[in-house]
Image: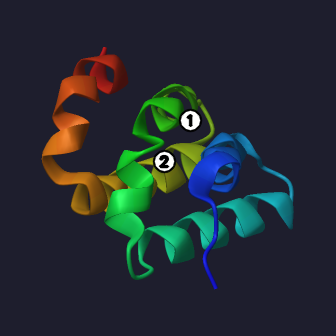
Amino acid sequence: MSIDYDPLLVNCFEGLCETDHPYSFMANQALTEMLMSEGASQKTVGVLEKLILPMRTAMLSKDTKVWANACDALGLLSEVTGQYLTPHIHILMG
């Protein structure tokens, strides 16, 4: 079964800012499973630009759990997209 990463993965990244259960759990779990699935690299690179702003928003959160989840997601995203993430780092770190 093939899953379209746009808009599902984008919604998961937007869900990183959720603090209520089960929404935060579902966003993080789905995001992790999608990024770790077979063929994720090609599918994720295709929607990478749409993931940057939700990721930045989560990384700027004052909620430590949201921030920690965003850092975990960034690590996975980096593993999956490799060099394709590099042009966006200035947005995430700025």
The quadrant in which residue 35 appears is: bottom left
Residue at 24% x, 39% y: name it.
Answer: 85
Q: Residue at x 64, y 85 (%)?
A: 1
Please tell me in which quadrant of the rendered image residue 44 appears. bottom left
Which mark, residue 58?
Answer: 1
Q: Is residue 54 left or right of residue 87?
A: right
Which residue is at a point 13% across and 44% down the rendered structure image? 83
Of callouts 1 and 2, the N-terminal one: 1
What crowding class fits label 1: few (fewer than 14 Cα within 10 Å), some (14-19), or many (20 or more)?
A: many
User: Which residue is more in the foreground, 14 or 66?
Assistant: 14
Which residue shows up at 20% across the image and 25% down it?
87
Residue type at numbered disc 2: Ala
Where's residue 88, x and y in %?
Answer: 28, 26
Residue carrying label 2? 70
SS state under label 1: helix
- Residue lying furthest front in this view? 2
Q: Nearer the viewer, residue 41 or 76?
A: 41
Q: Is residue 12 above or below residue 31?
A: above
For the residues marked 1 and 2, what is the alpha-carbon distance in whole angstroms?
Answer: 6 Å
